[in-house]
Image (cartoon, rainbow, N blue to C red):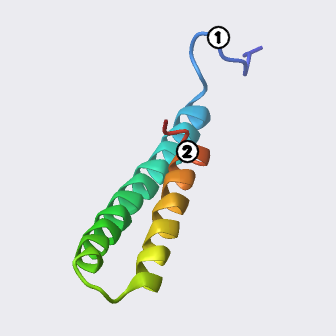
Amino acid sequence: MASHEFSSSVPPPWQLEYESALQEDHKILFKRIEVAEAATLTRREILMQSPDGFAERQETKLALAKLRNLKKEVLKFL
């Protein structure tokens, strides 16, 4: 009678695939956050040199805070 259990030191193949999929999602999310941060910081620099745009500067500040929170809460990035 064959046992369907795996040894505790070797994870089953489905678990490796599952963990790989989760990591891939986080890699994609991390990259998207990086791109969004770069675009937001670039726009904020442009707005800092202009007397107009106070409201948009405030929006960029909030957006950056939300992106930092997303990295911290979802990606466990410190």
**Mark 1: few, some, or many residues within 10 Å (few <14, many ≥20)?**
few
State the separation of the CA atoms marked 2 and 1: 34 Å
Q: Nearer the viewer, mark 2 or mark 1?
A: 2
Which one is in front, 64 or 34? Answer: 64
- Please determine whether, in this image, residue 67 is positioned above or below residue 26: below
Which one is in front, 24 or 7? Answer: 24
- Please determine whether, in this image, residue 65 is positioned above or below residue 72: below
Mark 1 residue element: loop
The kind of residue on which mark 2 rests is Lys
Horizontal and vertical percent position of residue 68: 49, 53
Horizontal and vertical percent position of residue 63: 49, 68
Query: Who's the residue at 29% across and 79% down the image?
Result: 47
Which one is in front, 37 or 17? Answer: 37
The kind of residue on which mark 1 rests is Ser
Horizontal and vertical percent position of residue 62: 52, 68
- Please determine whether, in this image, residue 69 is positioned above or below residue 56: above
Res. 72 mark: 2
Say whether residue 77 is left or right of residue 34: right
Quadrant in which residue 50 is drawn? bottom left
Of callouts 2 and 1, which one flags the residue occurring earlier in the amino acid sequence? 1
Say whether residue 55 is left or right of residue 10: left
User: Considering the image in quadrants, where does the N terminus appear?
Assistant: top right
Res. 56 mark: none
Question: Farthest bottom residue?
Answer: 52
- Please determine whether, in this image, residue 9 is positioned above or below residue 12: above
Which one is in front, 30 or 67? Answer: 67
| Residue located beneath label 1 in the image | 7
Horizontal and vertical percent position of residue 51: 29, 86
